[in-house]
Amino acid sequence: MICGPTAVGKTKLSIELAKAYDGEIINADSTQVFRKMDIGTAKVTEEEKEGIVHHLFDIRDVEEEYTVFDYQRDCRYWINDILSRGKTPILVGGTGLYIKAALYDYHFEEEETTYSFQGKTNEQLYEELKMVDPHSTIHPNNRKRVERALTYYYNHGKPQSEEKTNTLLYDAIFIGLTTSREILYDRINKRVHKMFSEGLLEEARIFYDQGIRNRTVMTPICYKELFLYFDGKISKEEAIELIQKNSRHYAKRQYTWFSNQLPVEWVIVDFTNFQNTIEEVKKRLEKDS
């Protein structure tokens, strides 16, 4: 499992490890399962794949639902399929709940009923969650996960936190890529500018013009900020700055979650010579295998 915040080199590392260990890559990012959300989610390109087989990318349209239950089922299928063929499954991504759901003994049931939480603030939803699940560790501002936890409770009559265990189902090694906050924030800021040069504005405009305002499109950082620009509420420059700021804050939350929830071995990335990072990770893998 390769985890870490955005813009830290997970994709590049995963390709090199797949080459070295006869691997196939499984997406562990909740936004990259959706088609046409390419630039905004920093999805791996065909050129970047270098012929390596990738799974669970572009498997749903943005109008379709895809839950953590769906991911758990699909990811475990591919893990077992890849292992059965004598190859190495390599999970790559930054969605912590998806990672834990796939690799640990979490029991989810398919949710038959969806609920609308529109009109309620983050604070109101969080208070509602604490009433039904006082042991929840979800951050109050992580609206998507708060809504998911409430939906789970209303479907099953029991808190989602009761379904979680720390029993690891696979012989997995967790590698986390890290760097100084200064370097990471600079890379995030530059990546946002690169995304705009690659056509992020046009990608977001398609969803905006189609009137798509569902959770799938409004949860990832970039689209909702650009919708504010399209609505004339902020300038393009303000939208860029807001995307950068929200991305930096998200990266900070990712570090905290991974450090507290997973047995991650952190590797400091050498951006001046990424091959050094690759070799360091290989050493860790060979030591732990």
Image (cartoon, rainbow, N blue to C red):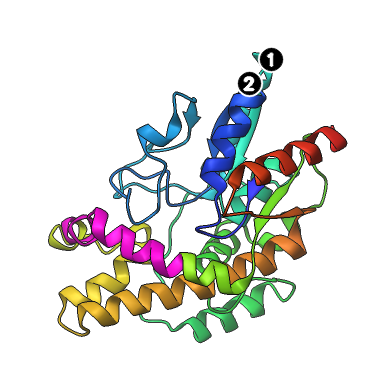
| SS for callout 1 | loop
Quadrant where the image shows the N terminus: top right
Q: Is residue 233 magenta?
A: no
Specify start and end residues of the magenta stretch as a single range.
Answer: 188-206
Query: Which residue type does callout 1 highlight?
Result: Gly
Query: Which residue type does callout 2 highlight?
Result: Asp
Quadrant where the image shows the C terminus: top right
Residue situated in front as seen by the camera: 241 or 71: 241
Residue situated in front as seen by the camera: 7 or 146: 7
Seen at 42% across and 41% down, the residue is 44
The picture places residue 271, in percent across and down from the top left corner, at 57, 54
Q: Is residue 11 visible?
A: yes
Q: Which residue is mark 2?
A: 22
Q: Is residue 204 magenta?
A: yes
How many numbered markers are drawn? 2
Label 1, residues with CA under 10 Å away: few <14, some 14-19, many ≥20: few
Dominant secondary structure (helix, strand or loop) of the stretch shown in magenta: helix
Tell me whether the residue at label 2 lies in contact with that at label 1, contact meaning CB atoms closer than 8 angstroms.
Answer: yes
The single residue placed furthest to the front in the displayed view is 272
The label nearer to you, 2 versus 1, is: 2
